[in-house]
Image: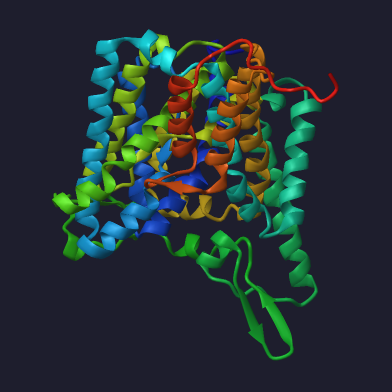
């Protein structure tokens, strides 16, 4: 039921499902860099709507905080301040815009010759495989909760009927959340009192000790929810007044050449990531979004969304693999679902209380969810190789696929490139350099 009109009774829970999928990663980036989580939610929502406007509302994508910029933002913020980091991120988005113009000029066929299925497939695989460590870290906070959540999603996806079958992620989160509350109630009944703070509630990693007892921090803690106001207007601040918390702060950017030279080149990596995501969405939806609305338009939308986010003091945006996984699982591809999800995130970013309530979703619950979502992204890459009949008996193809996967997930760093960006660029170069000779077949030891 890809793009069929949906009544609000179905549209709303489907959109909430996408909102929950992006929420954890989107606020994690500002928490790690010192940026404002509420601002990140606001800029991801408005950036997503801007992306849909530029692409004509054709691509079912959600844009959230980019992990690729974490290290450079930390570096620049420590040396030059958050305002300089924001200014540098604006230039990173403008590199997208420049590349978009070049692709429009040379045409998509030239791009497709450079990046054939033998490169595309493993690049998509590394998007999911590269996030496996994140899924592991989240799930290991409480493996029981993670596995219960994962099992719930699997059962609902396979055995549920009707509309419930379309919202396995939302249902899994609800069941995992309820199971966590049950465990905490059991602890309370046994006399184990939970003393955690809101931070403990979000990440569930700390413990507190009292004489004779170990006091686990709660996985769900509502203290911050009670203290947060229902509504808070955004405020423009300079670096000196920037807090990085307490409602939306629009940080006025500052432009420093040294900061720009550190952060802006990261756009090369994230543009390759963008291509991989667009290919993954195209394979999932079974529409060629590289041709229509066109890679140049999706790059333009992503770049302008990144510059817009940075202009307001939020982290750069990128298309989210978590939401691609939701698309693959639910088979509901209507872009309106993603647009409404962005609208909901926008409203919730203005309410600190709602934001704190969403933040109480236990990390292992989301860990159970993303185990499946990230794996499904990798499966889309395998499907790309199979459906395009990429011959892995051909030594050339085998070399390209092997190196992309290992470079993409090993963490190896070469010339400043790491992860999927390194794997993708290396694969593109190997495809251009290595001769394509049909006689180069892998040796079969059985022959």
Q: Quadrant of the C terminus?
A: top right
Residue 44 image position (x, y, % from top left): 37, 39
Q: Can residue 16 be seen in this snapshot?
A: no
Q: Nearer the viewer, residue 385 or 297?
A: 385
Image point (37%, 31%), residue name: 271
Classify 165 as above or below 264: above
Q: Quadrant of the N terminus?
A: top right
Residue 245 image position (x, y, % from top left): 34, 60
Q: Decide if residue 369 is on the left or right side of residue 404.
A: right
Image point (48%, 11%), residue name: 288
Q: Decide if residue 238 is on the left or right side of residue 354.
A: left
Residue 183 image position (x, y, % from top left): 75, 61
Q: Decide if residue 170 is on the left or right side of residue 86.
A: right
Instruction: List the single residue furthest toward the bottom.
Output: 211
Image point (26%, 50%), residue name: 262
Image point (68%, 57%), residue name: 140
Res 52 → quadrant: top left
Q: Decide if residue 389 is on the left or right side of residue 359.
A: right
């Amino acid at each position: 039921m890809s793009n069929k009109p949906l009544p609000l009774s179905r549209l709303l829970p489907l959109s909430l499902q996408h909102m929950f999928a992006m929420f954890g990663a989107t606020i994690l980036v500002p928490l790690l860099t010192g940026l404002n989580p509420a601002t990140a939610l606001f800029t991801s929502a408005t950036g997503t709507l801007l992306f849909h406007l530029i692409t004509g509302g054709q691509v079912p994508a959600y844009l959230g905080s980019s992990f690729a910029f974490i290290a450079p933002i930390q570096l620049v913020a420590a040396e030059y301040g958050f305002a300089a980091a924001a200014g540098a991120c604006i230039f990173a988005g403008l590199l997208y815009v420049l590349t978009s113009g070049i692709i429009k000029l040379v045409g998509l066929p030239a791009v497709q010759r450079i990046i054939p299925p033998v490169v595309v497939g493993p690049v998509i695989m590394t998007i999911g495989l590269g996030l496996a460590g994140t899924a592991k870290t989240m799930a290991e906070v409480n493996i029981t909760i993670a596995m219960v959540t994962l099992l719930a999603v699997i059962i609902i996806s396979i055995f549920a009927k009707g509309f419930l079958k379309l919202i396995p992620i939302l249902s899994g989160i609800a069941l995992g959340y309820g199971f966590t509350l049950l465990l905490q109630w059991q602890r309370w009944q046994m006399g184990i009192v939970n003393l955690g703070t809101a931070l403990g509630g979000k990440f569930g990693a700390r413990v507190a000790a009292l004489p004779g007892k170990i006091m686990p921090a709660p996985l769900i803690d509502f203290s911050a929810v009670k203290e947060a106001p229902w509504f808070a207007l955004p405020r423009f601040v300079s670096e000196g007044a920037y807090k990085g918390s307490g409602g939306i702060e629009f940080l006025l950017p500052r432009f420093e050449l040294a900061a720009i030279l550190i952060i802006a080149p990261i756009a090369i990596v994230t543009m390759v990531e963008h291509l991989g995501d667009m290919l993954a969405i195209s394979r999932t939806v079974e529409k060629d979004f590289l041709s229509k609305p066109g890679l140049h338009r999706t790059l333009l939308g992503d770049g302008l969304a990144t510059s817009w986010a940075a202009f307001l003091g939020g982290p750069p945006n990128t298309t989210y693999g978590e939401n691609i996984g939701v698309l693959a699982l639910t088979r509901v591809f209507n872009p309106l679902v993603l647009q409404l999800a962005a609208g909901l995130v926008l409203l919730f970013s203005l309410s600190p209380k709602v934001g704190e309530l969403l933040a109480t979703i236990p990390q292992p619950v989301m860990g159970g969810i993303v185990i499946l979502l990230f794996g499904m992204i990798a499966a889309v890459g395998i499907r790309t190789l199979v459906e395009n009949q990429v011959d892995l008996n051909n030594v050339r193809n085998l070399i390209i696929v092997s190196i992309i996967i290992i470079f993409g997930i090993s963490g190896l760093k070469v010339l400043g490139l790491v992860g999927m960006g390194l794997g993708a660029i290396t694969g593109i170069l190997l495809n251009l350099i290595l001769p394509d000779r049909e006689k180069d077949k892998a040796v079969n030891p059985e022959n």
